[in-house]
Structures are given as C-alpha cells and as structure tokens.
Amino acid sequence: MDAEVKHRQALEQDLANALRNGELELHYQPIVNLERGRISGCEALLRWNHPRRGWVPPADFIPVAEATGLIVPIGEWVLQRACADAASWPSHIKVAVNLSAVQFRSRNIVDTIAASLRRSGLAPGRLELEITETILLADSPATLQTLHDLKALGARISMDDFGTGYSSLSYLRSFPFDKIKIDGCFIRDMRKSDPSSRVITRAVARLGNSLCIATLAECIETQEQAEIARAEGCIEGQGYFFGRPQPAAELAPLLWSEATASHDGDPEQESLPVASPLADADPRQIEERRIQALYELQILDTPAEEAFDRITRLARLILQAPMAAITLVDRDRQWFKSRLGLDIEESPRHFSFCTHTIGQDTPFVVPDAAADPRFANSPLVKFGPGIRFYAGVPLRTASGYKVGALCVKDVVPRQPTQEQLTILQDLAGLVVDELELRRIARTDSTTGALTARGFYPLANRRLQQAREAGKDLCCIVLDIDGFKHINHSNGHAMGDRVLAAVAELCRTQLDTPDLLVRLSGDEFAILLVDSDIEGATAKAEAIRAGIDGCVPAGLPRTTATMGVASRRMEDGDIKDLLARADKALREAKRKGRNRVEVLTESAGSSHLAA
C-alpha cells in the first residue's frame, strides 16, 4: 500500500510539471464517414511522454489529473492545441475534444472554449465537444445552461459512450445533442452471427435518425464491423480499422491528400467556409498580422532561457549539426532567442534562411546553399559562418501565424533523414508550447485581457515610443459598479460572463497599439497611445454608454465608473499614469458612480457623465 501511495504522489508531482516541460502531446484518431469512406473528423487524444517512465497510459494519469484539479489547465491546453491544429486542416475536417466533468464544471469553461476558437480562427462548427453521462448526472439548471451556452458558440455537442449509463435516453430529451457515440462494448461484439449487439446498434441509429442526431460507432476493428455499422444506419465510424492515433504532423498530409483527391463534386467540402485567419487578406495585411502576433509574444530581445536552450541542444544533437538556433523573424531582422555555434545575435532578414522557412508549412531544407541561387551570394554562405546546409521548421502559434523557426545548420552539404526531420518538427512543437505557456501567463483566461505580468513590459515599450515621439499617453481605469452583488446574486459563472462582455466592449475602442489589462477582480485599465485627452474621454463615454447593453440578458441594469488621465512622459513611468487615472476614478465614485471623471496634466478638471 505504501508503494502505491508513493507511486501516486510521484505521479502527481510529475504531472504538475508535464505541461510546463512539454511532455504532453495530442494524437489524433480519424473519424470516417461510413457512406463516403472518407475522413470527416479526428478525435484529439491526450498522450504523456514521461522523460523516465516513457509513455504513461491515459488510464493512469487522467484520474490523477481530475483528482488534483490539474485537468483544468491541461484541458485548456488541449483545447488551444486541438483548435490550432485543426485550423490548419482542410475546412471540412472537424476535431473532437473530450471534456472531463471537472473541466466542464469549472467557472470559465465557456469563455475558455470561446477564446480557443477566437485565437485559432477555427470555425466553431468544426469543434465537437464530447461529454459523458458523468457530466449529466447532476441534471441541474447550471449544467443545461452551460450546454446551451456552448451550443450558442456554434460548437457541436456529442454524447460519448452512449448506452453504458442508466439515463442516456432521458438526456436526449433534455438537450439537443448533435451526435451520439455508440459505446465500443456494443461494436466489439457485433458480428453477423451475433444479432443482439447488432439490434441495439440498429435501434440507437434509428433513434438518432428520428431525432436528427448523427450516430458514430466506436471501436471498429474489422471490415465486418464497419460493414455492419454502415448497414444498420451509423453515419460515422472510428477505431483501429480506420487508423490508430497519430501526431498532427503525421496525420495532416493524409488529410490534405484525401481532400485533394475528393474535392471535385463532394458537397461536404463546401459545407463550411475556410477558417484560416488569413483568408481574404492581401500579403501586406498577412505580414502585418504576423508581426503583431510576434510582438504579442513579448519574446523579442529577452535574455536567454534554459527551456529554449534545452530544445536547441536536442536539435543539434539529433541532426548532428554544429549550429542550431531558435529564431524570431521580425520586420527587418531575424533575432536569435537561442543559438549554439553562432556568434551573432541577429541578422538582416532579407538574406536569412528562416524568412523562407516561415513561408512553408513543412520543413524547409537546403542541402547545399552554395549551389542554391537563393542563397549562394548570401554573406552567411560566402563568409562567416559559411553555411552550406540548412534545415528549419516554422514555429506556428496558436493563432495560426508563423513567427520564426527552429533550425540547424552545417558547413558541409548534406541531406537529413525523414526521421530527423520528424523529430525536428516535434522539437519545434515544444518551442511553440513554451511560447504559448508564457502567453497564457500574460493573458487573463476569463476576459482575454492582459494580466499585469503581460501588461507592464508592453506598456513600457509604448512609454519609450511616446517619449521618442514627444507624445502624451492617456489611460482609462474602469470599475464595474456593484460587481460583488452580481457575483453574490447570480453566481460566479454569470460574473465571469459580465467581465468577458465588458472586456469585449472595451476592445471595440482600441486601436492597434492600445493595451487592455485586467488589474484586479472587476477593474480594467486601457492604455491609449494615439489619443489626446478629448479622444480618451470620448472612448470612455462610449464604453460607459454601452455597458448595460453588452452584459448577459436577465441581469439588473449594469453600469461602470471610469477615471481618465493623461501624462507627459518625459519622466515618470506607467505606474504614475495609472495612479493618476485611479485618482480620477476615486473622485468619480465619490461623486456617485456611473460617470467619467477626467484628470489632465495641468489640473484636475472634471467631465461629468450624463
């Protein structure tokens, strides 16, 4: 017994570090349309590659994650990763993600899913959320409300393991599911010579058809099972017969080759719009958005970090190359976050190899740079360090933008093996995970606004730019009136929805360089870069006027009080400006709330809300 307890405690500690250390992975198992015989979606399955234990079975670590609450941050990572991966697939391919009971009951699950969709650019209709009867056992108004909220996002809801519980049919009456997944225990026993499981499968398929709910047969392992499932009316099938779970990098070529082969005349191909965040944008817009995504990472010109250096060392070791680097491609330069065997910290972008890498979706390989007209005259080839071989993998963020590369270089021509390139892609995924972990720490999960940790580095950069341009900066500090009462009377879930709605309203008043930060529970600040005090006041009034209309229906009238301040930035810092805006906010509260108070540089003149 003591050994079991120690084993579990060690597993808990290791799991707590697994996400940060990049040990968790998503593998995807194909879901096949049985009528067409083609892939219609993929289920995201969590895998843990422990550095000492090797692959840890999900049955071992998922219960630990649920018991400790780690399933919530892990589940958030899964949603973000799955949506980002699926956004790069053909537009008719859906992705299915399992929601655990603990994750489902977390306060901000709806906002977490909405944020994952927004950041990835994935069409909501391409996300399927799988829930089990465990979630539905509560049968509470809160459970049904969450399901309806998820449905309102446009996501599809599936009931997993249908038929194994006691009340599956009653749940179909309570909520309009999009799909029923028939549990594998019925499918595994389904043979032409054994009619009982076949009759059950037929009954469920007919029930789904009557209710306009699609049915999927799980755990199909043989041709016979696939034929029976199709004959009995199942729309989709899933199991080892169609394919084992595999990483996104290995699955994507299959999805695209099948999509290309079946494109002509396939109505399913046209059922959903392309979900790429880059759709309908000209190259200049795409590049500008890519640069903005890079800047939002707040990684440029930061000190070396062991987490990134560790990945670079592995890349150099695996490729047996003297040089390896993690680069970020800025507007006019490539900057090295991590480098081995290279003496330079950055180089001009126009002759860099990584500029070409970010234009690719797959590894970019130059076997002999001296023989390649694109690079033969590059100073990096003709002079030091004398690069002849290059292999790089683009770093694609969760929002879909390629911000840099993980690359290796050599001074002799060579050709990497496919296995080496596959490992290099896996390592690039670890780099992206590290970047994403840092971004998550800088972003408030409820509202999408910056946290204080994310705000101050960006704000100080805006401060320096304002000083160089001789401009003032303006700041709005906003406090939601009576927010504690909203939480107390309507619950924290409703309070979180109010916060998210207010943040979204604030974003409508932001220009590209402006910043929105959640300072505390119900207090936000907006840093305005290109607005004078009159413009800042007008933005504050527009937000104040729109507050009541943006919050969820059914709440009493909701208002906000704001303070506005400007500051000449020859001296002082961002905290001084925030303090001035906060002083104006306190004055507005003293005068009665639901108003805007203005504090200019020279005097404390007031602007009263109408």
Image (tube, rainbow, N blue to C red):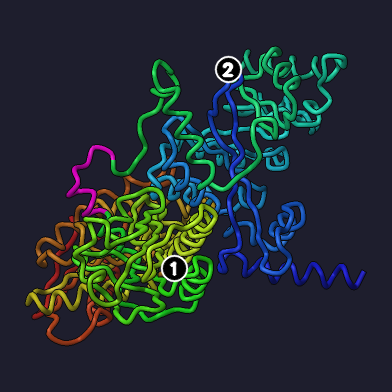
Going from the N terminus, do you reach mark 2 or mark 1 first?
2
- Of residues 10 and 527, the one nearer the viewer is 10
Q: Which amino acid lies under the numbered mark 1 shown in the image of this protein?
A: Arg
Residue at point 55% right, 52% down? 78
Q: With respect to residue 459, does 32 lie above or below?
A: above
Residue at point 71% right, 13% down? 232
User: How many other residues sit within 10 Å of disc 2, few (<14), some (14-19) or many (≥20)?
Assistant: few
Q: Which amino acid lies under the numbered mark 2 shown in the image of this protein?
A: Cys
Q: With respect to residue 333, does 138 lie above or below?
A: above
Give the prevailing secondary structure in the magenta stretch.
helix
Which portion, as a residue range, is magenta?
Answer: 279-289
Residue at point 66% right, 14% down? 233
Return the mark for residue 34.
Answer: none
Residue at point 80% right, 14% down? 199
- Where disc 1 sits, the SS reads helix
- Where disc 2 sits, the SS reads loop
Q: In this view, does 46 lie to the left or right of 419?
A: right
Give how far across and how far down residue 291 sits, in percent.
25, 59
Q: Quadrant of the N terminus?
A: bottom right
Q: Which quadrant of the figure has residue 204?
A: top right
Q: How far apart are marks 2 and 1 (CA)?
A: 43 Å
Give how far across and how far down residue 113 sits, in percent.
49, 47
Which residue lies under the disc numbered 1? 438
